[in-house]
Image (tube, rainbow, N blue to C red):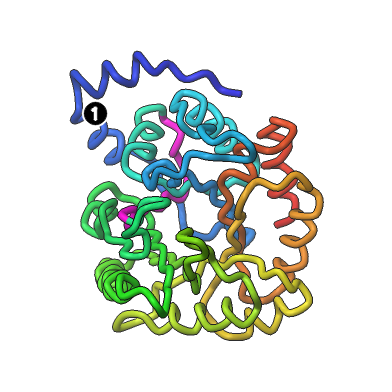
Amino acid sequence: MSTVDIADLTRVRATRPEAIREAAAARRRRPLLGASGRLLIIAADHPARGALGAGGDALAMANRADLLGRLCTALRRPGVDGVLGTSDVLEDLLLLGALEDKVVIGSMNRGGLAGSAFELDDRFTGHRAQDIERLRFDGGKLLLRLDYADPGSLETMCGAARAVNDLAERGLMAMVEPFLSRRVDGEVRNDLSAAAVTRSLSIAAGLGGTSAYTWLKVPVVDDIERIGQVMATTTLPTVLLGGEVSADQDATFDRWRTALRLPNVQGLVVGRSLLYPPDGDVAAAVDTAAGLL
């Protein structure tokens, strides 16, 4: 994997903070969709919610040099279109020159800290639409977890609608990741049944004053035979959510392959499954995912 000099990054941040703005202004951009009409985006916005685990390691994502090295390795592989992250991660990648000719998506609501009492009141503490525009990024991602029994979900839903509107006014993609969720023994669990995912997509697709710039980020449902029925819920472009690291990587790839055959599925947004594969080979995992597209 790539080696990242943390001391050098910290020195630039301490002595020339304007270097981030300069790198963003000089970055070569590309169209959202390339010639293939597909997207493979590497996700790295988990740490800002305090979700640092991957596989059996509860602090896998806590080492920033290691995480950046994995991201740089992934972003150099053929077929990788871009990255999704919070401001700290994306600005490190800007300073490293790793975002040239890549699609860049800023993560917007990180206030629902993992394991907190207010987890479902997931406020917008990350990128704002004006930040994404100023940095010349390509869109914003928002997480929309809805628990019908938790009043905090309503605030999250209203914030998501405002973000969709703010991004659309600037002609920027809004990537909405919806779930129906509930608490089990105090822990938030997402319902991945076909019925729940279908309902969550219907709610997310109707957010805001226009859906012209809205994409949906969708989990692959437990009942793979019903994935077509779930995706028939919307005409909006969708990308598949990679999910947790699985010990059976081949089974995960098979599920993605099945879902990618559907007409409104445009690609994959995957984080830990590719950055922290069971065998540790980031390049091979990324290449396999790219091959599915």
Q: Nearer the viewer, residue 240 or 56?
A: 56
| Residue type at the position of mark 1 | Ala
Residue projecting furthest to the front: 185
Please name the residue shown 60% across and 38% down the image: 275
Name which quarter of the figure residue 117 lies in.
bottom left
Task: Specify start and end residues of the magenta stretch as a single range.
Answer: 97-111
Instruction: Identify the element where label 1 is drawn.
Output: helix
Q: Is residue 164 visible?
A: no
Crowding at label 1, few (<14), some or many (≥20) Cα neighbours within 10 Å?
A: some
Question: In the rendered view, would you say 35 is above or below 223?
Answer: above
From the top left corner, tell me how far across and down residue 258 is, in percent. 77, 67
Question: In the rendered view, would you say 140 is above or below 166?
Answer: above
Quadrant of the drawing holding the C terminus: bottom right
Please name the residue shown 30% across and 50% down the image: 136
From the top left corner, tell me how far across and down residue 159 is, in percent. 27, 70
From the top left corner, tell me how far across and down residue 114 is, in percent. 42, 51
- Residue receiving disc 1: 19
Quadrant of the drawing holding the N terminus: top right
Q: Is residue 231 visible?
A: yes
Please name the residue shown 31% across and 80% down the image: 208
Instruction: Give the prevailing secondary structure in the magenta stretch.
Output: loop
